[in-house]
Amino acid sequence: MQIERDSFTSKFGVIAAAAGSAIGLGNIWKFPYIAGENGGGVFLVVYLVFIALIGIPVMMSEFIIGRKAQQNVFGAFRSLSKSGFWQIIGVMGVLAAFFILSFYGTVASWTIEYLLLAVKNSFAGKNADQIGEMFTVFSTGTYKPVIYQIVFMALTALIVMGGIKKGIEKYTKILMPLLIVIIIYLDITAIALKGGSEGLRFLFNPDFTKLTPHLFIVALGHAFFTLSLGMGVLMTYASYFNKDTNITGTSISVAVADTVIAILAGVAIFPAVFAFNTQPTEGPGLVFVTLPNIFELIPGGYIFSILFFLLLGVAALTSSISILEVVVAYLSEEKNITRTKATIIAASTITVSGILCTLSIGPLKNFLLLGYNIFDLLDFIASNILLPLGGMLISIFVGWKLDKSIVIDELSNYGTIRIMFFRIFLFSVRYLAPIAIFFVFLYGIGLFSF
Ligand code: TRP
């Protein structure tokens, strides 16, 4: 059955959709909280190095494979290689998508609660302790977070059912720039807070004595997570790219935009952490217990708090649709079921495992596996193991397996544009990325030490 594939209508649409996937809770929720848990500045440095040296080349690799093959992850490797081995990337990718969307939906449900709290003006007049308490009471609850999670997953599924053009492009173009403007406004206020400079020092003054094996593996995992790499999301998107999308340029733009937003979020959050006496190691609730304190202080705080949590939810949505898309493309194109049916099956099973993640913050918090609750366990396995392994295989595939002429054709748009940074790219996908990932991995799980 040959179905005509959708494609993006404009160049901006491509970048907006890729950026829409990359920019999400990873930047505004996850980056600050894991940076906070891993020493701040030192984490930032390691993470930036991984983005530049590994993230961008792996992103380019996904784009090359996806646009060349014009298929979902499984079909792509089948059409580009005779060996069945590379299908493992697809298997790990679908598994990672499943795990990630489960806990992503949990945090997305928090944004819904915070949007409603903002509308009700519930942060007004509360001190930092009371705001912290609000988060604990809500997130450890049973019914509310579960219901919001179901709402969020249903929304995600509805958009994915609508198809690529209509569904994704429309939502990403206008709203993300607005989110950035609000974060910059928060930054300005945060920097001016009494005691806030301590937070900037925490984020920008690396203390290299805080380097740990765990930090390396978390920073690498986060480089993949925040750029949506390692499981074929961007590969699937690139299968919808036009012939004239500049792969190198798009990769660099997306990575830079993504990183800038993470740092801007950090600049709003860490000064508030120190000014309001929260702990940087607060954990997953960090953004939810710090920013409401700032909204109370700024002119227009009521409106901005509503807009912020609304747009954070939208940012989560544009990312979650890209995660669900991997599973749906797989089911619909590989198993030959309709897109609608595939979406319903994928979304409902992920909602079930997502509810377990949500409950693992509260009622099930003492249920631990390998020392992690379910939420953290799925995050660890997906972000820190499956994504980097997927990225390693993807870079090896492009560096060693794929015909160099295909790589050159894709990067030069069949000879119509000049290839930038080709040698660095080739060096990274052949040696640097796979070897670095391999060692970080062994180091992180303790099988190797300096
Ligand atoms: N990158 C997104 C974020 O930062 C999350 C995300 C979307 C993702 N698609 C992904 C993570 C694919 C890993 C793989 O919020």
Image (cartoon, helix red, strand yellow):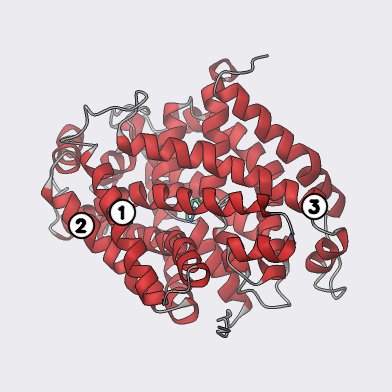
1 and 2 marks in contact (CB < 8 Å): yes
Number of other residues with Cα within 10 Å of mark 2, as a class: few under 14, some 14 to 19, many 20 or more:
many
The residue at 38%/45% (across/down) is: 29
Q: CA distance from mark 2 to mark 3?
A: 45 Å
Residue 148: give its label.
Answer: 2
Q: Tell me the quadrant of the picture where the N terminus can be found.
A: bottom right
Residue 204 visible to an observer of this rendering = no
Cβ(mark 1) to ligand 1 < 8 Å?
no
Q: Amino acid at mark 3?
A: Lys
Query: Which residue has dot 1 on it?
Result: 108
Query: Which residue has dot 3 on it?
Result: 401
347 and 192: which is toward the camera: 347
The residue at 60%/40% (across/down) is: 389
Q: Can you say whether 150 is above or below 380 in the image? A: below
Q: Tell me the quadrant of the picture where the C terminus can be found.
A: top right
Q: Determine which quarter of the picture holds residue 363.
A: top left
